Amino acid sequence: MTNADNSKSSSLLLLIAGAKGTVASTVAVALATMRKNPQAVLSTLTTRNRFPYLEPAQDIHMAGWDIQSDTLTGCIKKYAVLPENLWDPHRKDLDDIAIFEAPPADLDLRGQIEHLGQDFKKLREQFPNARPVLINLLPACAQVDVEKTVRIDQLYSEVAFKNFPDLAYALAAVLSGIPIANLTPNCLEIPVVVQEAIKRKVPLSGSDAKTGQTYLKIVLASALKARNFYIDGWYSLNILGNTDGKNLMDPERAAGKITNKTELLDDILGYPVGQRYGEPSHKVHIDYYPPRGDAKEAWDVIDFQGLFGLPMSIRLNLQARDSILAAPLVLDLARWMAALKMAGRSGPVAELGFYYKKPLGDNPPLSFQDQIISLEKLEAECDKMIFHSRSES
């Protein structure tokens, strides 16, 4: 027998840290819509034709935690990400979602983990047949150096967790056997968490979901590399006016995201952009611009060389909606993590690099082509493990 988790289950349960934010609230509306009009949402998912052994994708529940006191529908109205006619018909269902207050700030890390563990227990009693997945959507925070911390007791005594609230959610989930999808640039995948995840057969994926500009950057960089064009410089500007944009005006909070956006290009190409100048010529800027709200805009100027070193360039202007791009990825990753848990995978899952700016694990796929192939192979692995396990049982 394998170690795959194949107990009968009727649904998925998304446990969202940051459950009243712009992305999570958009997910909530998508889930409510999916129960009445499945194709309105399913048609946007990359997993819509995957995982026949999971229950219907529209059978997904949500719960979570947030520091905001307003109701979920109050937050949805305030953000104005979605027109009222899309969410108001679901008002009662949305405000009935179980959203707990974040653990009290006066608790230490151990206390926060125990507090969340009790919340997990209540939710499992409320949804006894559901497969839980933790989705981290907390705001970007300043980077915390915990790479040398290898034991949980060290974390309890050494880490200033109030500056890194994600850590309590991650450890509480792993200790409860719950898989994690980390869509933030905050580094949850520290040695202690990874070791516990492997020991407890919990899959992890992350970090920093790529939704718009970075997704297209990988596609274009992969295409230019395939033609052996030399990229001489790449200038990227993002303007957005939502809470994420405002949060990223703090240089310490933005550092991780900008690093993730910058390093991936060199990784794909195999050389540092700007090497002939002796300094980087891949520039990434994020600016908070309130009039844009959630409707972010991204500008890219790509300078590259072809035959005889003659210069050419591409101009790309993406006018997008931040939460509309991100919400389907949350649903996709929840389904991937449930399937991976069933298949017995544990620790970082590098093959999910398609979804992330900074894929975790050993030798993650970097180019767009490799990321697509990697997903197909991972799906086949899940299918094989799960069907084999079922045939044995």
Image: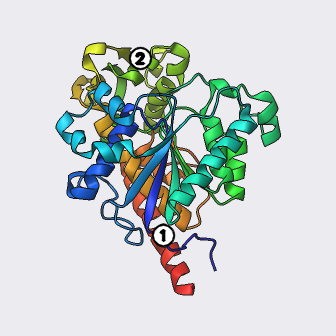
Mark found first going from the N terminus, 1 or 2:
1
Residues packed near mark 2 inside 10 Å, few (<14), some (14 to 19) or many (20 plus)? some
Number of numbered labels in the structure image: 2
Q: Quadrant of residue 202?
A: bottom right
Q: Residue at x 63, y 23 (%)?
A: 163
Q: Is residue 119 left or right of residue 11?
A: right
Front in this rendered view, residue 369 or 357: 357
Residue ID at (57%, 86%):
392
Image quadrant holding the C terminus, namely bottom right
Amino acid at the residue labelled 1 = Ser
Taking the spot 46% from the left edge, 26% from the top edge, the residue there is: 262
Work out whether 89 lies above or below 3. Answer: above
Q: Which mark is residue 246?
A: 2
Q: Are marks 1 and 2 in contact (CB under 8 Å)?
A: no
**How many residues crowd mark 1 within 10 Å: few (<14), some (14–19), many (20+)?**
few
Query: How far across and how far down the image is residue 256, in percent?
Result: 53, 26
Q: Which mark is residue 158?
A: none
The residue carrying mark 1 is 9
Return the residue found at the far left.
Answer: 85
Q: Is residue 139 left or right of residue 285?
A: right
Q: In terms of secondary structure, where does tag 1 sit?
A: loop
Disc 2 on helix, strand or loop? helix
